[in-house]
Every structure is written in C-alpha cells, then in structure tokens.
Image (cartoon, rainbow, N blue to C red):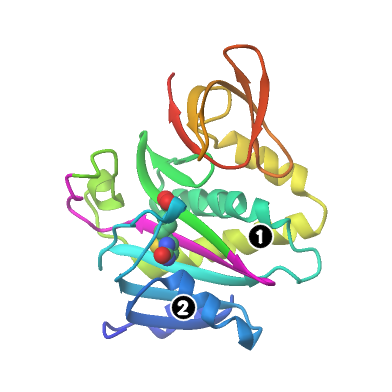
Amino acid sequence: MTTEVSGERLAGLARYGGVHLLDEVGSTNDYALGLASKHTKAIVVARRQTNGRGRFRRQWFSDDSSLTASLLLFTNTPGFPHSSLVVHLAGLALSRAVDETVGLPTQIRWPNDIMLNDRKLAGILCEGRRNSIAVGIGLNLNQDSLPEDLPDAVSLRMATGKQWDKLYLLENFLREMFTCIEKTAKGESTQVLADIKQRSATLHRRVEVRTLLRKHVGTVIDLDAEGRIVLRTDSGRLVVLGAGDVRRLT
Ligand code: BTN
C-alpha cells in the first residue's frame, strides 16, 4: 500500500498472520487462497479490487474508502470449527468489532450480512480450497455516499459523520475472530452460537428466503449447530436451509 501504515498497526495485524497490503488486486479472497501453499495464516488487505465478488458470484462494490480484506485460515488446524460455521463466527466477530470500534450496535442478517439500522454495512464471503479457507470481508467504511444502485447500504461514515481507521477496525475483527475460533476449539460452541443468535436480525422473524431452487416464506425458529436456519413455513412444514437470500417481512 502506498499510503503510510504505522508500525503499531502492522504489528497489531501481524499477531494473526503474514500481512499483505496491496494497492490493487482482482479479489483478496483469490489472493489469499493463492498463498495457501505456504501453510501460514495470512491477512490480505487491498485498497481496490477489480473483480471483487459476493455470494452467488455477484459483483461486489468497493473502493478505497472500504475495508476490503481476507483472512486465510487452515481447516486442518486441531479443533478448527466445521467449515459451515466459519461465516457465522466471522459475522459475530465483525459485528463485535464494529461495536467496539464505533460504539454502534449492529446485527447479523443470516447468513453473512452485517446490518446497521436495517441497512447493509458489510458482507462476508468464505471460500475454501482443499484445507484452506479465505474469510473475505467487505465493509463500507468512509464513503460519504454509496452508489445509487445500493439504496439499502450504509457506511460507517454515513452513520456517524466520522472518518474511521480501516486497519484498527480490521485488528479488532481479527482479535474477535480468533477468540471465537479458540472458544469453539475449547468446546464452547454452544455459547458462541448463543452470542450469534443474540445478534441475529433474522431469528424469530417472518422472512422470505430465496434459494437457488425456490422461495420459502415463514418464521425462523432456530439457528442449528451448523449455522443453518430452521424455518417454519406458512404451511406448517419445518425446512432447514444452509444458504439463501433473506428478506425480512416483519
Ligand atoms: C456478500 O455480501 O455477498 C459478501 C461480500 C464479500 C466481499 C468481500 S470484499 C473482500 C473479499 N474479496 C472478495 O472478492 N469478496 C470478499
């Protein structure tokens, strides 16, 4: 990165893995997964992505004012959580990191969005290859405004009127993420799941869930141990879903 980064910030990040600060990259997730052969945890931060993507391979908007980063982890680490849980741990960690950094309460919209006042602040995309997993986070940080085609999105700057330190927020996220992973490894995943549920914007809500194949409407009655939602549909059926786009109806 051409802008100056303080030694303190770099040292803070380096506690969690090798640090790669880039001016431009296709996708930080791809870059992180490309480092997997080194078998070392890594943190990749980019000022710009030319091919950033979201879930279902949707294009992901970001610019220099965004926090755009990926954390490379290894699933064969002893005690590592089930891969399907990682996105939920990252959601909890990012929600907590925003609260700690900014002092504003955020919620997690299942499965991977961080919401502030019902608007999307951040998205998380976890992608795996063999025994590695890239946890990609895209957070709207210092934008004064966002593109018109994202009317439901918000940045921390828009919400607070203040400028925020990208790498400080990232360091808080990393600390929270590794705390969640360690707790899971110690057998405390029930507590972690309870913390995720407590911040959920989806649990106990009437929702419409669109999956690749169909649409379900009903009330979310639980989040199971693998991070799937349990939906009681309007026709009274119980449906367990591991992926989908949620729209809240209440
Ligand atoms: C979503 O809401 O669909 C998830 C968006 C995830 C975007 C981040 S930005 C850093 C990382 N690199 C990518 O290409 N995507 C993720």
Q: Which residues are magenta?
A: 128-148
Q: Which residue corresponds to mark 1?
A: 179
Location of the N terminus (image quadrant): bottom left
Q: Residue at x 18, y 50 (%)?
A: 147
Could you tell me the amino acid type at mark 1? Thr
Q: Position of residue 111 (x, y in %)?
A: 54, 43
Disc 2 C-beta below 8 A from ligand 1: no
Q: Position of residue 219 (x, y in %)?
A: 57, 20
Residue 150 in the figure: left or right of residue 216: left
Q: Residues within 10 Å of mark 2 (few under 14, many from 20)?
A: some
Q: Is residue 162 magenta?
A: no
Looking at the image, tell me whether mark 1 or mark 2 is earlier in sequence order: 2
- In-front residue for pair 11/52: 52
- Marks 1 and 2 sit apart, C-alpha to C-alpha, by 25 Å
In the picture, residue 220 is in which quadrant?
Answer: top right
Dot 2: element: helix
Q: Which residue corresponds to mark 2?
A: 31
Note whether 53 is above or below 223 in the view shown: below
